[in-house]
Image (cartoon, rainbow, N blue to C red):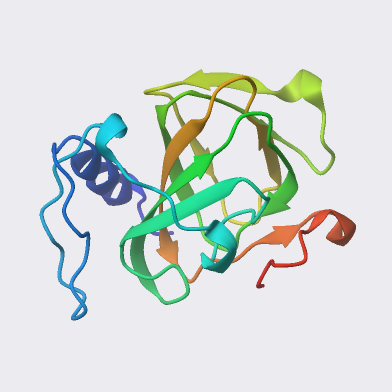
Amino acid sequence: MKSIFPCLVFAMTLMTQGHMAEAQDADGSMQIIVASPQQLSVTQSASKTAGVSQVSGQSAKTLYGDPTKPGLYTVLLRLEPHKRIMPLSHPDSRFVTILSGTFYVGFGNAYDETKLNALPAGGIYTEPANANHFGETRDEPTLVAITGYGPSGTTYANPADAPSTVKK
């Protein structure tokens, strides 16, 4: 089993750097990123980003790597208020860090509000490979950083819950 500690260290390094530059050159080399959560611009629709839930009201930006290919990646995901993510899983293990707002996350094959854990900015959780999890935002937008080792993807526990834009 691969250690996920290097992934966490990488994600934390990205988040503690200041103003934001483009995250990655076309050749795949890492750019310097210095940004607070308020300075991060995440406005592109998440509909074409692998490894995220694809619910409406999400935007995403890949900071490093490519979630569709083998290797380390980090994706910023912004969720609008009052968004619910039904149970889903990913083929890769990932770390998630809440950068702003509060994200409510739970684990299991069925959505169960009593299993939600409120994680404010600074909170973290892991998504073990193939572990179904679900979540929601409430009255505020939420920004999270997801770091994993691809390739990634998204599989809903109940296929009927999957938005029609999900690419598996």
| Whole-percent x, y for residue 73 in the image | 35, 61
Q: Residue at x 43, y 51 (%)?
A: 43
Q: Residue at x 61, y 19 (%)?
A: 139
74 lies above or below 142: below
Q: Position of residue 143 (x, y in %)?
A: 44, 36
Question: Which quadrant holds residue 149?
Answer: bottom left
Q: Residue furthest left?
A: 32
Residue 104, quarter of picture: top right
Task: Describe residue 26's horizontal placement relative to residue 82 as left or right.
Answer: left
In the rendered structure, the answer to whether residue 71 lies left or right of residue 162 reads left
Quarter placement of the N terminus: bottom left
Q: Nearer the viewer, residue 85 or 117?
A: 85
Of the 4 image quadrants, the one containing the C terminus is bottom right
Residue toward you, 67 or 23: 23
In percent of width and height, residue 153 lies at 59, 66
Q: Residue at x 71, y 47 (%)?
A: 132
- For this rendering, which residue is in front, 55 or 132? 55
Looking at this view, name the residue that lies furthest to the front. 43
Q: Is residue 46 left or right of residue 107?
A: left
Q: Residue at x 36, y 50 (%)?
A: 4
Say which quarter of the image contains residue 12.
top left
Farthest-out residue, bottom: 27
The number of discs equals: 0
Task: Give the image location of residue 146, x and y in percent.
Answer: 43, 48
Q: Is residue 46 above or below residue 35?
A: below
